[in-house]
Amino acid sequence: MAALLWLPWNSVLADEKNGELDIYFIDVEGGAATLLVTPAGESILIDSGYPDYGGRDLNRIVRVVKEVAGRTRIDKAIVSHWHLDHYGNHAALVSKVPVTAFYDRGIPEDLPEDKGFPERIALYRAASQNKSTALSPGDKLPLKNAETGRRVPQLTAEVVTSSGKTIPNEGPANPFASEHVAKPEDTSDNARSLSLLFKLGDFAFLTCGDLTWNTEQRLMSPNNPIGQVDLFMVTHHGLDVSNNPVLVKAIEPIATVTCNGPTKGGMLPVLKTLEAIPTLKAQFQLHRNIKLGDDVQPPPHRIANSSDTAECKGHYIKASVSPDGKQFRIQVEGQQPELFETRLSK
Ligand SMILES: [Zn+2]
């Protein structure tokens, strides 16, 4: 392999953003909380883990936001869907760090699968001062881009699914469309998850919340409107009611990160589907699946936390994308980063 150099890495002042896009996958024990810090220094938190557990997930998020990423505020707090392990701390966050704006898929009247929804959504409404923005497929997240005059690519973020709807099924034919085997229709909020496609030059990152099988198929069949993706956050913690091959094979990821817990997600059928993708170089997981053999999981240096929840240190995984979008590295907290090259055209 050719020598991969990526300069300057550390030649910027600590309080100055270095032009990279940073993506932190925060360990919330099988929920989700993903912090993006954009080249312009904007901070975007997608989902916020579980509530309770003595503030465990809230504290982990605040540590990464303030101490690791050095941010003093969250510019955009996004909810992928209305399940506790995804918006558990949106309301509590505002007491720890200022949040400028809230985005979600739209607030439903009721959520049959959660009896506590009315109280929880009241807290969310209060925290967002009733000003959350509902995002629809095709919407672009408004992002600041640096006005340096330098010829660097602009970061974009497009909503590709929301509330069960998808962007139009345009683009080249998806060669994997015929692999769809329908599963029972999912009536839960998972099927209505918000999915976002971030792009920085040639680099693309896809995150779909807990989007489930048949919505994945509707998004990706018969055509592929997404194209190829370099970094894929494995959907729904790596559960096999999500990660339809019609989607994951078509996007041809180079690297994946699974936000699983010790006993939630990171399932074997998903590991196998991903492993068989020719472009895939590495799978990362926030947790070792303690119910599954080590031989079928990623190697230890690509797993952030190996113990069960009681012993867990809550290590994060960080992806950093070069300012030109041509390379990215992935680092498990406390380990050496690994470098990957973005595909040039898609
Ligand atoms: Zn969910």
Image (spheres, rainbow, N blue to C red):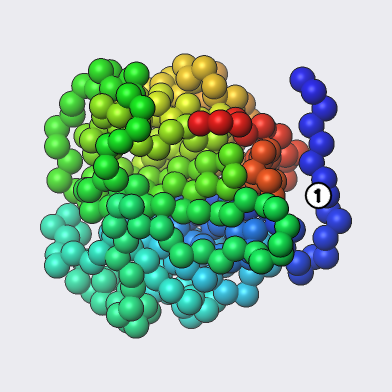
Is residue 104 in sight in this rendering? yes
Q: Position of residue 116 (x, y in %)?
A: 21, 66
Instruction: Note whether 92 is above or below 281 in the view shown.
Output: below
| Quadrant assignment for the N terminus | top right
> What's the amino acid at mark 1?
Trp
Report the front residue among 269 and 2: 2
Instruction: Note whether 215 is above or below 20 in the view shown.
Output: above
Is the residue at mark 1 in contact range of ligand 1, meaning its CB lies under 8 Å from it? no
**Residue identifier under label 1:** 9
Q: Position of residue 245 (x, y in %)?
A: 34, 24
Q: Secondary structure at mark 1?
A: loop
Crowding at label 1, few (<14), some or many (≥20) Cα neighbours within 10 Å? few
Report the front residue among 163 and 154: 154
> Which corner quadrant of the image does residue 181 belong to?
top left
Which residue is depicted at the point 56% across and 31% down? 345
Left or right, residue 273 beside residue 283: left
Is residue 288 in sight in this rendering? no
Which residue is depicted at the point 65% across and 64% down? 146
Q: Position of residue 190 (x, y in %)?
A: 26, 47
Which residue is depicted at the point 65% across and 58% down? 39
